[in-house]
Image (cartoon, rainbow, N blue to C red):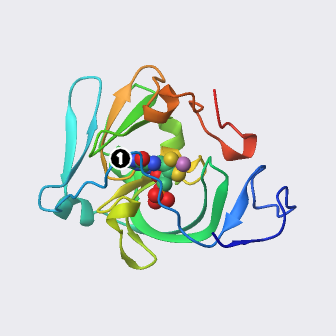
């Protein structure tokens, strides 16, 4: 793996503690890459009333989208600076949703899950991304669409995201069940619980 930016514990102020830079884009998947046809794809948000808001691919692409350039940080210690994405802000998706629940379980095609506080998805901090580097998102990296929550460790950015289920409590998702931190802020090194 190409490593630049100097030694570990580098004083680059944009690099969180215990991270090193990589120029490559590693693929980390706990299982096989699902193949999802955009004809069949949907994204949903389910609230405590049981109401489910659904977007099919056409409806999703018709929403306002944003170009996003962000640094990403994997808990296995690589960080990648200046990744370029296009996606729909979670603010846009949540503007159609009424909920009093403060936590979210993200569910992916293939069964992966990860938990987040709803607040961490709002105020311009999270997107459903469907392009990377100006091209459609590679299936290995979560295409057709993935969650992008770059201010938290990258395991929170669920690939092949399928929907969000609102929760009253911060129940653990897939990696969190194995001892990863419930929150996962790289600046506070919230790696494990
Ligand atoms: N559905 C799903 N999403 C996932 C994962 C996974 O195994 N399955 N791995 C997570 C982890 S641990 C990381 S570091 C990033 C890796 O994203 P990448 O493969 O695009 O680098 O995806 C996250 N999202
Ligand atoms: Mo990861």
Corner quadrant of residue 143: bottom left
Residue extending furthest toward the bottom: 134
Up/down of 190 relative to 85, above or below = above
Answer yes or no: is residue 131 visible. Answer: yes
Q: Which residue is mark 1?
A: 31
Residue 103 position within the rendered picture, expressed as x and y whole percent measured from the top left: 45, 29
* Label 1 residue SS: loop
Q: The N terminus is located in which quarter? A: bottom right
Q: How many marks?
A: 1
Up/down of 55 relative to 192, above or below = below
Is the residue indicated by label 1 positioned so its CB lies within 8 Å of ligand 1? yes
Indicate left or right for 178 with 7 as reference: left
Residue 162 position within the rendered picture, expressed as x and y whole percent measured from the top left: 27, 46
Identified at 76% across, 61% down, the residue is 14
Up/down of 146 relative to 152, above or below = below
Camera-side residue: 78 or 123?
Answer: 78
Identified at 60% across, 31% down, the residue is 181
Residue extending furthest toward the right: 11
Indicate left or right for 88 with 10 as reference: left
Residue 60 position within the rendered picture, expressed as x and y whole percent measured from the top left: 25, 59
Up/down of 29 relative to 174, above or below = below
Neighbours of disc 1 within 10 Å: few (<14), some (14-19), many (20+):
few
Camera-side residue: 142 or 188?
Answer: 142
């Amino acid at each position: 793996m190409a490593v630049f930016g100097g030694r570990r514990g580098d004083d680059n102020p944009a690099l969180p503690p215990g991270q090193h830079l990589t120029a490559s884009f590693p693929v980390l998947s706990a299982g096989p890459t699902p193949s999802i046809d955009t004809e069949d794809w949907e994204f949903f948000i389910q609230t405590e009333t049981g109401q489910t808001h659904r977007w099919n691919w056409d409806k999703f692409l018709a929403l306002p989208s944003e170009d996003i350039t962000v640094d990403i940080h994997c808990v296995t210690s690589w960080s990648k600076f200046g990744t370029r994405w296009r996606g729909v802000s979670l603010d846009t998706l949540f503007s159609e949703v009424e909920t009093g629940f403060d936590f979210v379980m993200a569910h992916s095609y293939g069964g992966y899950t990860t938990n987040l506080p709803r607040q961490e998805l709002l105020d311009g901090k999270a997107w459903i991304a469907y392009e990377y580097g100006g091209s459609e998102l590679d299936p290995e990296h979560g295409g057709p669409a993935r969650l992008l929550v770059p201010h938290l460790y990258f395991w929170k950015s669920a690939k092949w995201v399928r929907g969000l289920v609102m929760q009253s409590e911060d129940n653990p998702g897939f990696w969190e069940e194995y001892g990863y931190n419930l929150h996962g802020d790289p600046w506070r090194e919230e790696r494990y619980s």
